[in-house]
Image: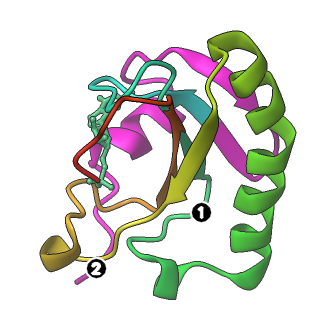
Amino acid sequence: MAYDSQNIFAKILRGEAPSFKIYEDDKTYAMMDIMPQTRGHLLILTKEGAETLLDLSVEGAQACVATAKKIAPAMLEVTKADGFIMSQFNNEIAGQTVYHVHFHLVPRYIGQTVER
Ligand code: 5GP
């Protein structure tokens, strides 16, 4: 499937749709998830036009992980979470709904369960 530049995350990156920005650099953009699985759920978007991890350059993937390492300590500090999940879904069968590569940072709290 060809990358669709009209997907919602591409629009957010172009400033054509709103978002709650947390962090940005030349390769990545981090924002709050609009439907958080837990309090403080963040998304890290690549700035490359890539649908899935297999379309993303190694440099783009490294940049997303570097951003996770930069922002996760503040996420944990602000939310007082006990840990977090970093996840990334590829294709519909795996639960991908937005076809622009992104990583989830989902804070986890002792005693609270989440679906994924
Ligand atoms: P996926 O299932 O593709 O890995 O995750 C897509 C994520 O994007 C979901 O957690 C969903 O809540 C989030 N999302 C979908 N549309 C928007 C939006 O317009 N803004 C923000 N901030 N998050 C969105």
Q: Is residue 42 left or right of residue 6?
A: right
Residue bearing the label numbered 1: 48
Q: Where 79 sits versus 5, above or below?
A: above
Which x, y percent locates residue 109?
50, 28
In front here: 82 or 73?
82
The numbered mark, 2 or 1, whose residue comes first in the sequence reads: 2
| Region in magenta | 1-29
**SS class, disc 1:** loop
Q: Is residue 3 left or right of residue 101?
A: left
Q: Residues within 10 Å of mark 1 (few under 14, many from 20)?
A: some
Q: Is residue 5 left or right of residue 49?
A: left
The amino acid type found where label 2 is placed reads Ala
Q: Residues within 10 Å of mark 2 (few under 14, many from 20)?
A: few
Residue 107 included in the magenta stretch of the image? no
On residue 2, the disc is 2
Q: Residue at x 67, y 81 (%)?
A: 57
Residue 23 position by quadrant = top right
Which x, y percent locates residue 43?
51, 40
In front here: 100 or 16?
100
Residue 4 position by quadrant = bottom left
